[in-house]
Amino acid sequence: MSAMTDTLKKHQKHLNDTLTDNEKRRSIIQKLMWDEKKKIECNSYSTSANYLQRNSVPKKYRTYHEINITPIGRNNLCRQNSTNTLSFDSSYEIESGYNITSCPCSSFICFEPHFVNSRMENGKKVYYDFTKDFDGETKKCFIYDEEIDYMRETKQLWNEKIFQIRVRKCSCGIVFSK
Ligand SMILES: [Zn+2]
């Protein structure tokens, strides 16, 4: 990453300072668990935004936004990072929805609840993802979802909203568990 601007440095500090110790601990543990899992299942792939082909995605989700990650917020804390971004700069809004990834042949598609930010710049809505990816991804394929937004507002747990679909026979021959 190129030299961080002062604004980004301040934003990063704000995101870190507004987390509780428990949240920080959870972020670290989730990364350690993932790294360990990858070591054990050394022949397994994980799905990636980089594999996703837009025309594989069901029409309903095809208008997803590709967002380059600005990795200043801790991994696995996208809800906190997007919320705390508002108290750093109130020109941002929270966007609730799904992060879409796929297997290398883009047949097996995963949807995970995810939270990013947006703001109007020169009359256009621009999306930002301030959460570092736990698997080193550098971009996210994100689509807004009303139900996830409602769940965030009403503080419901959205963990079980993860889902996967198979749009055609997968030629990668791998079993996914991400
Ligand atoms: Zn595949």
Image (spheres, rainbow, N blue to C red):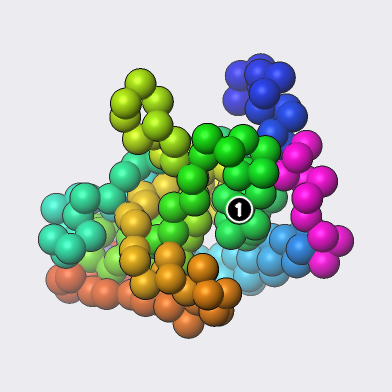
Residue drawn at 36 percent across, 50 percent down: 141
Q: In the image, which residues are magenta? A: 13-22
* Residue 38 sits inside the magenta stretch: no
Determine which quarter of the picture holds residue 68.
Answer: top left
For the image, the number of numbered tags is 1
Q: Which residue is mark 1?
A: 83
Q: Is residue 149 visible?
A: yes
Along the horizontal axis of the image, is 178 left or right of 81?
Answer: left
Name the one closer to the observer, 38 or 159: 159
Q: Secondary structure at mark 1?
A: helix
Residue drawn at 35 percent across, 21 percent down: 122
- Residue 175's x, y, as percent? 39, 76
Q: Is residue 134 visible?
A: no
Name the one closer to the observer, 155 or 81: 155
Name the one closer to the observer, 14 or 169: 14
Determine which quarter of the picture holds residue 107.
Answer: bottom left
- Indicate whether 131 appears above or below 152: above
Residue lying at the far front in this picture: please name it.
90
Give the main secondary structure, helix, strand or loop, of the magenta stretch.
helix
Residue lying at the far bottom in this picture: please name it.
160
Mark 1 residue type? Thr
Residue drawn at 82 percent across, 46 percent down: 17
- Indicate whether 39 appears above or below 115: below
- Indicate whether 28 appears above or below 53: below
Along the horizontal axis of the image, is 24 left or right of 97?
Answer: right
User: Dot 1: few (<14), some (14–19), or many (≥20) neighbours within 10 Å?
Assistant: some
Residue lying at the far right in this picture: please name it.
21
- Residue 94's x, y, as percent? 49, 51
* Residue 20 sits inside the magenta stretch: yes
Name the one closer to the observer, 43 or 73: 73
Residue drawn at 78 percent across, 50 percent down: 18
- Residue 5's x, y, as percent? 66, 19
